[in-house]
Image (cartoon, rainbow, N blue to C red):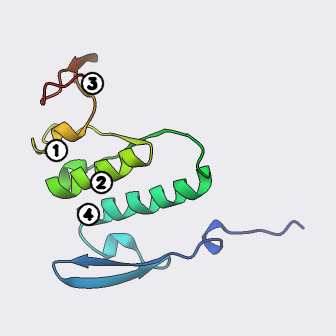
């Protein structure tokens, strides 16, 4: 019988999340959904996924696009920092966020609107070419 290796046994993850001055530790056994608010958990997951991706692609010029739900639940400053980190690592964030904080909109390279199945490319709010 072939040996079975569980993916979770190959990784050891440990970290700290500081929220409003309170530090919370986590490891691979921690249920992230119980660690903090939805917004912070979304950011933490994306940071962990980015770290894994960096290890896997080994400096090869591979670009990714990630679809992320609930981006509107993040505060503007965290969203802009997240977008910057992802962009620096060759990852484009794709999201549908009709109620997105206007301060965050310039952090996205492309803006589109879908109406009755038709896709419309919108100009960037900062006036720069996309």
For disc 3, the neighbor class at 10 Å (few under 14, some 14 to 19, many from 20) is: few
Tell me the quadrant of the picture where the N terminus can be found: bottom right
Q: Nearer the viewer, mark 1 or mark 3?
A: 3
> Residue 130 — which label?
3
**Disc 1 target residue:** 104
Q: What separation in Å lies between label 4 and label 2 (alpha carbons)?
A: 15 Å
> Residue 13 — which label?
none
Vertical side of 123 occupied by 44: above or below: below
**Disc 2 target residue:** 82
Find residue 94 and report its image quarter: top left
Q: Residue at x 50, y 76 (%)?
A: 28
Q: Would you say the residues marked 4 and 3 are in contact, meaning their CB atoms lie under 8 Å apart?
A: no
> Residue 38 — which label?
4
Q: Nearer the viewer, mark 1 or mark 4?
A: 1
For disc 2, the neighbor class at 10 Å (few under 14, some 14 to 19, many from 20) is: some
Q: What separation in Å lies between label 4 and label 3 (alpha carbons)?
A: 30 Å
**Mark sitting earlier along the chain (4/3):** 4
Q: Residue 14 location in percent, x, y?
A: 47, 79
| Circle 1 SS class | loop
- In terms of depth relative to the viewer, which is nearer, 87 or 74? 87
Q: Residue at x 51, y 75 (%)?
A: 13
Tell me the quadrant of the picture where the C terminus can be found: top left
Q: What separation in Å lies between label 1 and label 3 (alpha carbons)?
A: 16 Å
**Mark sitting earlier along the chain (1/3):** 1
Q: What separation in Å lies between label 1 and label 4 (alpha carbons)?
A: 18 Å
Q: Residue 110 location in percent, x, y?
A: 27, 28
| Left or right, 20 with reference to 89 | left
Q: Would you say the residues marked 1 and 4 are in contact, meaning their CB atoms lie under 8 Å apart?
A: no
């Amino acid at each position: 019988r072939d040996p079975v290796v569980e993916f979770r046994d190959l990784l050891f993850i440990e970290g700290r999340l500081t929220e409003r001055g309170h530090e919370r530790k986590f490891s691979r056994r921690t249920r992230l959904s119980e660690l903090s608010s939805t917004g912070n958990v979304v950011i933490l997951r994306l940071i962990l996924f980015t770290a894994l991706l960096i290890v896997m692609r080994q400096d090869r010029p591979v670009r990714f696009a990630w679809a992320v739900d609930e981006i509107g639940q993040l505060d503007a400053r965290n969203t802009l920092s997240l977008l910057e980190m992802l962009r620096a690592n060759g990852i484009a964030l794709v999201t549908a966020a009709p109620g997105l904080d206007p301060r965050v909109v310039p952090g996205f390279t492309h803006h589109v609107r879908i109406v009755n199945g038709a896709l419309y490319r919108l100009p960037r709010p900062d006036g720069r070419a996309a």
